[in-house]
Image (tube, rainbow, N blue to C red):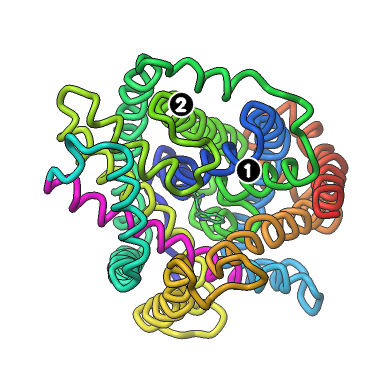
């Protein structure tokens, strides 16, 4: 069967960065940072991203491009009749879980586009904006409606296939998002009291670093880079044989981290200026942003453009999640692409509805005092992704081995790469040990 492929070098970076950059950077990162001690979290996060991001991402790309398969098929091809395909199955399930709660928040971006177009924020006080956000949650059905619309949009793009679907959308709009974040960051920092937010971000209080901060940073790093569940194995399988996997991994990691830090620079100065608590979670982003636009000339237009771009960023991420499930169904269960897309979308929408409804006040969908939404988030990001990433680097380092790894990263010897030995050493020894230590100490 002929497989789809990305059209150009920029294409892979754009598509992988499209998967990586999303609500994870703009919505989840500030939430986690605010709840885990500010600057201390940022330092741990950056250490993890820079230390583990490239080796894990490269390992996924290598597995994917080597085998030209979905995560389950890839492990099955490399080690037939072994337990390794379980890592692939875990990834497919994890993709479904993430898609279920991610689409909740993705749906909100659509609601906020509508609000922005209707000029429904301007002149309002923070307390009113906060009230309207919580009323919107508590309505329930409206969340669900937007969520289903969002999953439908995702399915539509995935259905059309990789090259003219994913690639086309990522390439133009992501740089635009970076640009608008820079404008917003400048506005935010120059608000009265905005520099308090800078101190919160950049003056770490090391006494705040605890096991749960460290594991949250690990989960956030993997979540933000779309690592540990086979998205990058699947995308790796679409990358051309001539492309440089190592430099692509470095570019994607840097781009993703840039967007996260920019988001922090937008959110925290403004939050401190308006008096939104850094621990406000979802409200931190959805209430602070409209307030910033209220304080800008041209705020009306910036607000619309911003929420449109945020929705697109979320879409390129949900596409990658759905694509993993679809690639598995098509290649392993031999369901045609049309039906596979429908099945995967409906399954994630069904789980997703419960995630959305669990955010209502007093909702029955909670486990041990935590909303179903938070449970899905915690289990996938802080448990399944680290486990997946651990086994992926272990696989490349110990099972696939040096010669096959070198062959794939150097494009069968065509690329001269002096640091390949060091990179392999990190993948084989340092990365699995580091993930295991962070995971075990963080959890217990
Ligand atoms: N990385 C995306 C974000 O930051 C979300 C995402 C897409 C993801 N695909 C993933 C997270 C795979 C984990 C695994 O918004």
The residue tagged 1 is 221
| Relative image position of residue 132 (x, y in whole percent) | 29, 53
| Relative image position of residue 392 (x, y in whole percent) | 74, 56
Identify the residue at horizontal 74%, vertical 28% (top origin). 419
User: Dot 2: what SS?
Assistant: helix
Q: Main secondary structure of the magenta part?
A: helix
Rate crowding at label 2 as few (under 14), some (14 to 19) or many (20 or more) other CA atoms within 10 Å: many
Residue 339 falls inside the magenta stretch: no
Viewer-side residue, 329 vs 207: 207
User: Dot 1: what SS?
Assistant: helix
Quarter assignment of residue 35:
top right
The residue tagged 2 is 272
Gap in Å between the C-alphas at discs 2 and 1? 25 Å
Relative to 144, 196 lies left or right: right
Viewer-side residue, 180 vs 341: 180
Viewer-side residue, 437 vs 361: 361
| Relative image position of residue 215 (x, y in whole percent) | 74, 47
Quarter assignment of residue 129:
top left
| Relative image position of residue 405 (x, y in whole percent) | 74, 47
Relative to 78, 227 lies left or right: left
Instruction: State which region is magenta.
Output: 92-118
Rate crowding at label 1 as few (under 14), some (14 to 19) or many (20 or more) other CA atoms within 10 Å: many
């Amino acid at each position: 069967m002929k497989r789809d492929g990305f059209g150009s070098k920029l294409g892979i970076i754009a598509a992988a960065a499209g998967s990586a950059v999303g609500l994870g950077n703009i919505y989840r990162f500030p939430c986690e940072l605010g709840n885990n001690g500010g600057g201390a979290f940022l330092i741990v996060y950056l250490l993890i991203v820079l230390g583990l991001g490239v080796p894990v991402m490269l390992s996924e790309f290598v597995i994917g491009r080597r085998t030209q398969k979905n995560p389950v098929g890839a492990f099955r091809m490399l080690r037939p009749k072994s337990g390794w395909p379980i890592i692939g199955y875990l990834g497919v399930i994890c993709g479904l879980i993430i898609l279920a709660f991610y689409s909740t928040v993705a749906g909100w971006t659509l609601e906020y586009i509508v609000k922005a177009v209707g000029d429904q924020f301007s002149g309002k006080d923070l307390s009113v904006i906060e009230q309207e956000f919580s009323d919107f949650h508590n309505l329930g059905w409206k969340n669900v409606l937007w969520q289903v619309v969002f999953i439908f949009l995702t399915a539509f793009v995935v259905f059309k296939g990789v090259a003219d679907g994913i690639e086309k959308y990522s390439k133009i709009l992501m740089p635009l998002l970076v640009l608008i974040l820079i404008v917003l960051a400048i506005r935010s920092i120059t608000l009265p009291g905005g520099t308090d937010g800078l101190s919160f971000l950049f003056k770490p209080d090391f006494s705040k670093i605890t096991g749960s901060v460290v594991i949250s940073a690990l989960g956030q790093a993997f979540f933000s880079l779309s690592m540990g569940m086979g998205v990058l194995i699947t995308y790796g399988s679409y990358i051309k044989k001539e492309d440089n996997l190592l430099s692509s991994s470095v570019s994607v990691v840097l781009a993703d981290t840039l967007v996260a830090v920019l988001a922090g620079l937008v959110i925290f100065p403004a939050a401190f200026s308006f008096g939104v608590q850094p621990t406000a979670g979802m409200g931190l982003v959805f209430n602070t942003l409209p307030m910033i636009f209220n304080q800008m000339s041209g705020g009306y237009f910036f607000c619309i453009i911003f929420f449109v771009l945020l929705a697109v960023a979320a879409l390129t991420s949900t596409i990658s999640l759905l694509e993993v499930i679809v690639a598995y169904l098509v290649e392993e269960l031999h369901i045609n692409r049309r039906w596979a897309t429908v099945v995967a979308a409906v399954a994630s929408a069904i789980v997703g509805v419960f995630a959305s409804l669990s955010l209502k006040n007093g909702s029955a969908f909670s486990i041990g005092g935590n909303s179903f939404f938070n449970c899905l988030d915690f289990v996938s990001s802080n448990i399944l992704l680290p486990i997946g990433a651990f086994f992926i680097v272990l696989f490349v380092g110990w099972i696939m081995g040096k010669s096959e790894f070198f062959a794939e990263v150097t494009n069968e010897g065509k690329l001269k790469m002096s640091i390949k030995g060091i990179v392999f050493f990190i993948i084989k020894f340092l990365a699995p040990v580091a993930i295991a230590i962070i995971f075990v100490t963080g959890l217990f």
